[in-house]
Amino acid sequence: MDRRAFLRGVGVLGCSAAAHPFLSTVTLAGSDGGRPLGDHRLVVMILRGAMDGLDVVQPQGDPDYAALRPSLLNTQAADLDGFYRLHPGLSGLMPLWAGGQLGFVHATSTPYRDKRSHFVGQDMLEAGTGMDVPLSQVKDGWLNRLLQTQAGLTSETAYSIGRDEMPLLEGGAEVRNWSPETILLLSPQARLLFERVYHDDPLFQAAAQEAMELADAGEIGMAPTPKIRGGVKIDDIEKLVDYAAGKLRQDTRIAAFSMTGWDTHRGQAAGLAKSLARLQHAVLRLQSGLGADVWGKTVLLAMTEFGRTARENGSAGTDHGTGGAMLLAGGALRGGKVYGNWPGLREADLYQRRDLLPTTDVRAWAAHTLRRLYGIDRAVLEGAVFPGLDMGADPGLLL
């Protein structure tokens, strides 16, 4: 029984949560001493539900786009480079674009094809493997495998925070768990019971002590009243971002978030706008929380399991597709650019005549970021972190 499983079971002794406490949306990894990960920060944000990259970064310069998206074509989208336009829901990020601290990758995807299952797509995204390896045989995520290649990490190598599981961090590297909106109610008698029952078991004793330390530090407590801005709930993402930013200002070097709400089968205009508002708030909150110095050493990669159909459906939405888009941000980014090779939207150019054709692998963008941020050897990235990946030429993402 691992520490995460044990802490899930703490509920029988008085731990309750507004949302399940040990299902994760944030992971943190750090180092001290020699700092093997250096001084740069990486933030990985998993956008669960398949974000429609064609709506977020609209290729309005493509002559076939308007016919495919008659109700989703947005004349208020901000011009990025004469070909692509940015959804109004991210208009607050345009100063970052102008400052070279925001970018995108279009027509990108994991190697996952054809079945278009959220669960399998997300598992492959976080496993960092290809179609040649059955997911049932993958026991760790690519971020955990990265940690396994680094010596000298602290005992607080990684945290899990929030509601959703993060296979991205599962694996052999040590993980500590923390959750917002958790109430840990332990009487002195219960504390004594913990100590006596698990005193002679190193694994359980350490996990119990960890839970009590978090409670004493005020990291497990009551959930405040939900915070709403512009009709969109933001307090949950603020908790995650603020906690991560605080750690990133110290010894933490890597954080990973998870945001849901990107499955837009119907009424996409309204649904996507709300999700983008939350994403925009998270990016700006992170920038503010890190401060200019740390933000200047940071790269954020926001990625999703797959894109959506090129043509909108009869419910003013889109269905599960293939090629999608990534959002990039940070002061260490060479932004102000939409990266990737555009395949076109003619029917003959679409994947299976329905989806945007992927021209790059999501894993390659993550691998090049890791290489440039932390100086990790290419052979390690292609062999251990993303097994089977051919990274290709360096796209020059970072300054």
Image: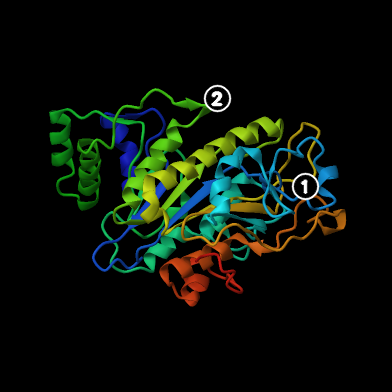
Residue 147 placement, left or right of 347: left
Badge 1 element:
loop
Q: Is residue 112 above or below residue 288?
A: below
How far apart in space, not on screen, are marks 1 and 2 (Cα)? Answer: 29 Å
Q: Where residue 231 is drawn, which disc sits there?
A: 2
Q: Which mark is residue 310?
A: 1
Asked whether 27 or 345 is in front, the reply is 345
Which residue appears at 86% of the width and 53% of the height? Answer: 347
Residue 387 placement, left or right of 340? left
**Figure label count:** 2
Q: Which mark is residue 29?
A: none
Q: Picture coordinates of residue 356 (x, y %)?
A: 75, 53
Residue plotted at (61% across, 73% down): 392
Relative to 316, is 127 on the left or the right? left
Mark earlier in primary sequence (1, 2) = 2
Res. 135 visible in picture: yes
| Amino acid type, label 1 | Ala
